[in-house]
Amino acid sequence: MPVTDSIADFITRIRNAGRARNKTTDIPYSKLRENMSQLLLEKGYIKNFTVITTEKFPIIRVDLKYGATGESAIKEITRVSKPGRRVYDGKDIKKYLGGLGLYILSSSKGIITDKEARAQGVGGEVLFRIY
């Protein structure tokens, strides 16, 4: 079945896998999803990800990260900008949860966090928030 919002699909697959306590989840490949996975890896929200080329189409296998007591490293992951309501923010983007969480933006510099956007003085579309 075709997906109309690939970012929401990415977020939902990660959220559902975390709630089900799955170790990994498979996500259909796209360059945007690979970049978002790389950013989540750099910020410590996932353990690892690999791009797997299958006969039909490539997938991204995301290894989820859990704490010592079994709680997910991702407490909340929510889509902000949606196809029906795009949300953009300038270079003075506010901190999410006072800096405890992150906004992930799509900017002219690529997929970056709110902290990086403030440091570089750029804005962009707010894709999702995570903590």
Image (cartoon, grey):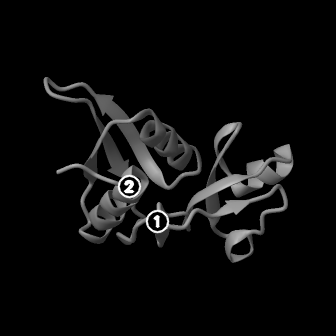
Residue at image point 28% right, 52% down: 3
* Screen quadrant of the C terminus: bottom right
- Point out residue 47 in the picture as x, y percentages from the top left corner: 42, 47
- Of residues 99 and 1, the one nearer the viewer is 1
- Amino acid, disc 2: Asp
Secondary-structure class at tag 1: loop
How far apart, in angstroms, are the residues tagged by discs 1 and 2? 21 Å
On screen, 104 above or below 52?
A: below
- In the displayed structure image, the side of residue 91 where residue 1 appears, left or right: left
Tell me which residue sits at (33%, 36%) in the image.
29
Tell me residue 89's x, y (percent): 73, 61
Q: Nearer the viewer, residue 33 or 20?
A: 33
Which mark is first along the chain, 2 or 1? 2
Q: Is residue 76 left or right of residue 49?
A: right
- The residue identified by callout 2 is 5
Residue 24 at x, y percent in the picture = 27, 50
Question: In the rendered image, which residue does mark 1 sit on?
Answer: 74
Name which residue lies at 15% across and 27% down. Answer: 56
Coordinates of residue 99 in the picture (x, y in percent): 73, 68
Which label was assigned to residue 49?
Answer: none
